[in-house]
Image: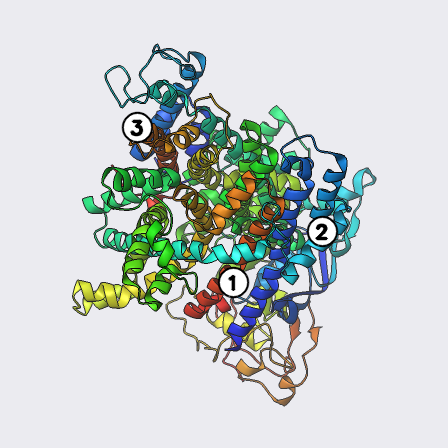
Amino acid sequence: MAQSDTVLLDVKGLVKHFPVRKGAFRRVKAAVRAVDGIDLFIREGETLGLVGESGCGKTTAGRSILRLVEPTKGEIIFRSRRMAGTAGGVKEVDVVKASRGEMKALRRDMQIIFQDPYSSLNPRMTVGGIVGEPLLVHAMARGEERKKRVADVLGAVGLKPEHMKRYPHEFSGGQRQRIGIARALVLDPQLVVCDEPVSALDVSIQAQVLNLLEDLQREFGLTYLFVAHNLSVVKHISNRVAVMYLGRIVELASTERLFADPKHPYTEALVSAVPVPDPDYSVDRIILQGDVPSPVSPPPGCHFHPRCRYAVDVCSKDAPVYRDLGNEHFVACHRADDLHLQPIHDRTTGQTGGPAA
Amino acid sequence: MSGLFRYALQRLVLTVPMILILLTVIFLILRVLPGDPVSAMLGGRPVPPEVLQSYRVKMGVDKPIPAQYVTYIGGVFRGDFGSSMRTSTPVLRELFSRFPATIELAIFGLLVAGILGFSTGIIAATRADRPIDHGIRIFHIASFAMPLFWLGLMFQVFFAVKLGWLPVAGRLGGDVAFTFQPVTGFYVLDAIIRWDGRSLADIVLHLILPALTLGVAMTGLLGRMSRASMLEVLGQDYVTTARAKGLRERLVVTRHALRNALIPIITVFGLELAVLMGGAVLTETVFSWPGIASYLMRSINARDYTAIQGSVVFIALFISVINLIVDLLYSVVDPRVRY
Amino acid sequence: MPETRETTPIRRSLLARTAGGVTRGLRGQTVLKVGLVIVIAFIVMTVVAQMWPSMNGFDPTKYRGAPRLEGPSATHWMGTDQLQRDVFTRVIAGGFASLVVAFSAVALSMIAGSILGWISGYTGGWLDRSLSLFMDAIYSFPSMILAIVLVAMFGSGLSPMIWAVGFVYIPTYFRVTRAESLQVRETTYIEAVKAIGASRTRIVLRHVAPNTVNAIMAVSSFNLADAILTVAALSFLGFGLPPPAPDWGFDIQNGQKYLQSGSWWLITFPGLMIIALSLGFGLIGEGISDLVNPKRRRKLG
């Protein structure tokens, strides 16, 4: 995965609240705090994994970054090469504040691959129509040229030009996902948000698609924000991983560091659940007690404290500060400095570690 | 019960603008649309201008449209529907006097439709895909395709003229009309109150054909709904459980399935109301039934604008109120609706 | 060959109407075929009757030396009326007003109602709420009475009936397309198209609308069936084509006068034609519904 040092996407303080309306006059009663203030950045060419349980806000975060959902607050700085034009260099655009025209132009640079291959393709359009539509919308290619471009991108994802005439229902789940990937790539974007792209696929197909995504990243120099709830998938494909819980990022670090030296109790629990292909490996699997609280009224202080086995007094009062512990290892935990958490024992990385303190 | 109260309030709040919209549309159609209502009413006869003007004043069309609108709306809320240009009696009074006739017809029509539709629907559902199911479904579909006025006429020709079993038209026979004294306007009820067997028989005989006509025409919708609803319920888990417990089929059907199948039926009753009123127009015309629908037709033919307006407004109000009641009833029966 | 899912073959084959396309798409749809046969037969019959009114030797509008008010016989298969006209000839030609008005009116409401429904369903917000309120108000009012009042104001004849009936059915299409649009709006592929940056117009026209076509087609068939009845009723009440044009509704009303004397044929035959045509449309509707929604597929014949 060729990486550069330039930051492509810089998110600061992103918040998305969904108001809850009740009553005949639709008064706003409360808000679902789907994304409750997150900071992250992605470098060009790298893959940032975003993990968490269902309802933690990761999907909303991905969509907010693309402004498919209007952010309530925050800054999303995207460094677009295309918008800088012939002058070269990059143009920084705040996605949150972008005008309609800017947004439309930005859409060429940021794309998304959806989770469900069965509902993300218009059943009444041909594959060629679906994949070619972005070119039409942005008036980038016409007629023969467009057909060629579509055929090219279909080839890149492992499909044939003849498939252009067929309809989505004629394809399997894995193939449909490839069509979705083709659609996302046809505009030659810089950033691709992958919203659980393999979760809906059979396990045997998942590996194929993941490999495809990696190959495409290499070939086209893509940057991925990879949203998933399956840590083992994320581990395989990401350079760095961010862990979300109830709308907040609790930990963000390079993949190696996250697994070898998790600093947040929630990460520890998630990590311990990752299966390791080693019959001699055994771990105290940490089972979290209780259910995930509602995002409408999250617990005060640290959102995780009711389920945390290391919680102390201050955890229920003050929200922990999201800080860099060094080497770009970010954590939001009061006890980050003194906890020694259980890492994953993995032969491939040669890491070991003892049980928690 | 606060959920119910809140829902009732919501519905009420919605009903008011809907009524206003209806009233406005009626106003636009009758006043704003084509031509001069006065000369239309007078049938294009040459009339001295002073007479024309006096009619105009009487009808209120000499004022500008917005002023007319305000008077109109105000009138409706005050209960002043104006006076019929044909008979010079207050429209509202005439409507009220004819209202029970239409209601009585509607009730018995619905009864027929309900019995026929519901029973055929249930039977069809319990014997799904067998010949009798297909037969009943064809019957339902045919009921949809049936022109109501034709059906009424057919009944008349067959039962009244050819067989002579039933009266051709009207609500009362000539001789009974002399002696019968209505109380509420609902003749069946009145005959019972007055303990007048002879009148009752006559009244019922007169009711049969019109009610049958209305009923058969509406059987299709109710029948289909009953069948679909029953089928769905029969496929549910709790029915399978009842069967697994060893309950006899009939018990399964009546005790468990029926009650839940009833819920969508109630909705249909609300929907049927508009269809019912439309059907009433044709039925009352064919059978010379003295209800508000035939009053409307007569007013239209006489170009009696005030009466037309009044009748239509009356019908609109009536329907809105009934729909509201049905909605509320429905929310009582099915609590899911309230939330 | 993978199983064909619900959506695609219908629109193209029905619209294309190529022989191969039609038979391929309609394979096994008995109900639909029967309905289509009936309707097409009626259309052909009416067109022929318009062009050659006196084809079977009897003029539907003029007097002839025929016996007056005679029941069905060998020469006059459906009898004669009080003006010595052959009922059969009149009945063959009598569907003209019904067909013309029904098709025109339904086309009118379909276009108006659907466009409003798409916009309303997709856009949402206050526009949707107010439009829905307006449409609900009209929908709740008896369509027959509304049509009668409209025609009474517009005058009688084909054109007024088209406008009146067309207006009355707008809420029907509005509701259907709005409901479908609401559903479509929530799908992922719509979100995908938004992610591409498509304009709202484009989304509504090229994505939302085509996915509502199935529902629209099913509704229009039933709508046409209903329209036939409504037009017949309007003619019956006197708002249709003026005499001596042959018209089912008018003829029935005419026949009403001679009911007491037992001349049943004046009423029965036109009525049967109305039923048959309406049934034809209804069967088409049933057939389309079954095609579109495989869950509801039942074998009826």
Disc 2 is placed on an element classified as: helix
Seen from the viewer's position, the closer of residues B101 and A329 is B101
Q: Is residue A285 visible?
A: yes
Q: Quadrant of residue B42?
A: top right
Q: Amino acid at mark 3?
A: Trp
Tag nearer the camera, 3 or 2: 3
Seen as rendered, the residue at the extreme right is: A87
Crowd class of label 1 (few under 14; some 14 to 19; many from 20; radius 10 Å):
some
Res A26 → quadrant: bottom right
| Residue at left offset 31%, top offset 64% | B196
The image shows residue B68 at horizontal and vertical percentages of 73, 50
Tag 1 near tag 2, CB within 8 Å: no
Task: Give, as a three-letter code, the residue at label 1.
Answer: Leu
Percent from the top left, x then y, of residue B152? 35, 41
Subunit of mark 2? B
Horizontal and vertical percent position of residue B72: 68, 53
Residues tagged by mark 1 and mark 2 found on one chain of the structure: yes
Q: In this orientation, does residue B110 appear? A: no
Residue that badge 3 annotates: C265
Mark seen at residue B84: none
Q: Name the secondary structure under disc 1.
A: helix
Query: Are there few (<14), some (14-19), or many (20+) residues within 10 Å of tag 3?
Result: many
Label 2 amino acid? Tyr
Q: What is the total number of numbered labels drawn onto the structure image? A: 3
Give the CA distance from mark 1 to mark 3.
44 Å
Mark 1 — residue?
B324
Q: Which residue is mark 2?
A: B69
Q: Give the left or right position of residue B235, taking residue B263 as reference.
A: left
